[in-house]
Image (tube, rainbow, N blue to C red):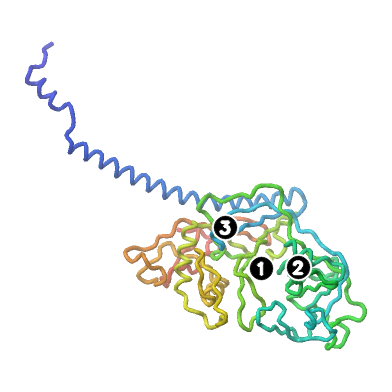
């Protein structure tokens, strides 16, 4: 075998390494590939995180339904607000059915607002029961439940009696359920011998006394009742959604009792602008939804990225003009998704709008046509992945669907976001 010549060996030796330019080119290619891979991985992780959160909510609700069917007793799920985004849910826990409270005796009355609402026996057709400066009209309707030995003051002090709970009058299957307001019970002062609840729907019977008399019945009126207390949390740690994933309540369709409210001139009722602390879905042993949530018919939970939930609503609420329907004085500042205060008119407009139209953005928001999303003039705002978890209350069925993000008028908000969930059609 011939050995390579000296000149050939010299040529091979001169190509034993790479030039600096070649190394830089290779390194640049590797960096670009790594960046592309990382972006793709992060995109997939974001999508899987939201999808995983939606499946987690579906599985947890289905678990409560299965428990109710297996135990032949009502079981449910309670949702908890996030500590930083007070218009979103990040955790949930299983609950036992509500207990019934029936201590003491009651007397049904018309409104009598004299002497700190203890009454002088004469009907008052108007009263400002919640001290918000607005006088509500009650007429001669029977709207007051006066109780002796009921312990309602202590229940309210312990957080077990609150607005929106239900009372059945009279006790038992022959009675009717009525939602209540607890403004007539003042825990800032000591308990009184007679404690009063306010029915938000007048009692169905007109009574047998003259309408000018506060006491509604001289004889034959109901004396017992059942008060539905909040469900008990089962001994377990709350289940937390994947980090950065939330149930955005402003984009969800939830029972009206969960929604925030706000004092509005000429409108009865008030609220603290927070969602309810008792957002419960309870399943019966037959598997359907029972309780106050059942009246919603269909419940949609909007599962999305927390950044989208905060940023888009923050920019939207900043753009709202003061609403003339809101009270001009005092100029209360109470709410913004990121924590800063906003004029009360903007808050009222925002809450009023989301009651009828879900606040769900389109997939891509064109900042050229949407003036309320500044800071993105050179590009559109692309919304991350999101899903709907739908509960059909009559059957107890639970499903997961994509959002219909169609935005024909280019205002940045989806027009029929629940379309796929409610029709069963699939997205393209």
Label 3 neighbourhood size at 10 Å, few (<14), some (14-19), many (20+)? few
Label 1 neighbourhood size at 10 Å, few (<14), some (14-19), many (20+)? some
Labels 3, 2: front one: 3
Q: Is residue 264 above or below residue 318?
A: below
**Percent x, y of residue 325:** 56, 82
Q: Which mark is residue 166?
A: 2
Q: How far separated are the C-alphas under marks 3 and 2? A: 28 Å
Within the image, what quadrant is residue 6 found in? top left
Q: How far separated are the C-alphas under marks 1 and 3? A: 21 Å
Q: How far separated are the C-alphas under marks 2 and 1? A: 11 Å
In the rendered image, which residue does mark 1 sit on?
257
**Residue 309 horizontal side relative to residue 56, left or right:** left
Q: Which mark is residue 153?
A: none
In the rendered image, which residue does mark 3 sit on?
83
Q: Is residue 157 above or below residue 65?
A: below
**Percent x, y of residue 308:** 46, 60
**Residue 69 horizontal side relative to residue 245, left or right:** right
Label 2 neighbourhood size at 10 Å, few (<14), some (14-19), many (20+)? many
Q: Secondary structure at mark 2?
A: strand
Q: Is residue 189 above or below residue 397?
A: below
- Of the pair 238 and 250, the residue shown nearer to us: 238
**Percent x, y of residue 137:** 71, 85
Q: Residue at x 37, y 48 (%)?
A: 39
Q: Secondary structure at mark 1?
A: helix
Q: Secondary structure at mark 3?
A: loop
């Amino acid at each position: 075998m011939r050995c390579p010549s000296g000149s050939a060996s010299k040529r091979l030796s001169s190509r034993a390494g790479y030039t600096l330019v070649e190394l830089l080119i290779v390194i640049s290619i590797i960096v670009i590939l790594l960046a592309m891979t990382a972006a793709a991985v992060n995109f997939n992780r974001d999508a899987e995180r939201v999808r995983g959160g939606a499946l987690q909510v579906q599985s947890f609700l289905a678990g409560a339904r299965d428990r109710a069917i297996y135990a032949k007793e009502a079981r449910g799920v309670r949702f908890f607000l996030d500590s930083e985004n007070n218009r979103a849910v990040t955790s949930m826990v299983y609950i036992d059915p509500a207990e019934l409270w029936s201590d003491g005796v009651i007397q049904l009355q018309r409104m009598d607002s004299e002497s700190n609402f203890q009454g002088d026996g004469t009907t008052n057709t108007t009263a400002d029961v919640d001290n918000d400066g607005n006088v509500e009209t009650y007429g001669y309707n029977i709207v007051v439940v006066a109780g002796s030995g009921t312990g309602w003051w202590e229940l309210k002090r312990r957080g077990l009696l609150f607005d929106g709970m239900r009372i059945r009058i009279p006790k038992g299957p022959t009675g009717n359920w009525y939602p209540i307001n607890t403004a007539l019970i003042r825990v800032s002062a000591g308990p009184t011998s007679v404690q009063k609840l306010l029915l938000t729907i007048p009692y169905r019977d007109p009574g047998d006394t003259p309408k000018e008399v506060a006491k509604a019945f001289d004889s034959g009126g109901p004396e017992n009742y059942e008060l539905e207390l909040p469900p008990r949390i089962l001994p377990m740690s709350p289940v937390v959604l994947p980090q950065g994933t939330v149930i955005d309540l402003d984009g969800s369709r939830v029972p009206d009792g969960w929604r925030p409210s706000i004092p509005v001139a000429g409108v009865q009722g008030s609220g603290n602008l927070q969602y309810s602390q008792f957002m419960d879905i309870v399943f019966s042993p037959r598997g359907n939804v029972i309780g106050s949530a059942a009246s919603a018919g269909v419940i949609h939970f909007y599962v999305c990225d927390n950044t989208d939930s905060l940023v888009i609503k923050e920019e939207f609420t900043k753009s709202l003009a003061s609403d003339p329907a809101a009270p001009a004085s005092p100029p209360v500042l109470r709410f913004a998704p990121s924590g800063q205060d906003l004029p009360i008119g903007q808050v009222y407009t925002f809450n009023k709008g989301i009651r009828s139209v879900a606040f769900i953005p389109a997939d891509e928001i064109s900042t050229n046509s949407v003036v309320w999303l500044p800071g993105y003039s050179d590009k559109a705002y692309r919304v991350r992945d999101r899903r709907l978890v739908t509960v059909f209350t009559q059957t107890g069925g639970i499903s997961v669907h994509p959002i219909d993000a169609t935005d024909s008028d280019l205002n940045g908000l989806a027009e029929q976001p629940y379309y796929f969930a409610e029709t069963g059609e699939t997205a393209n």
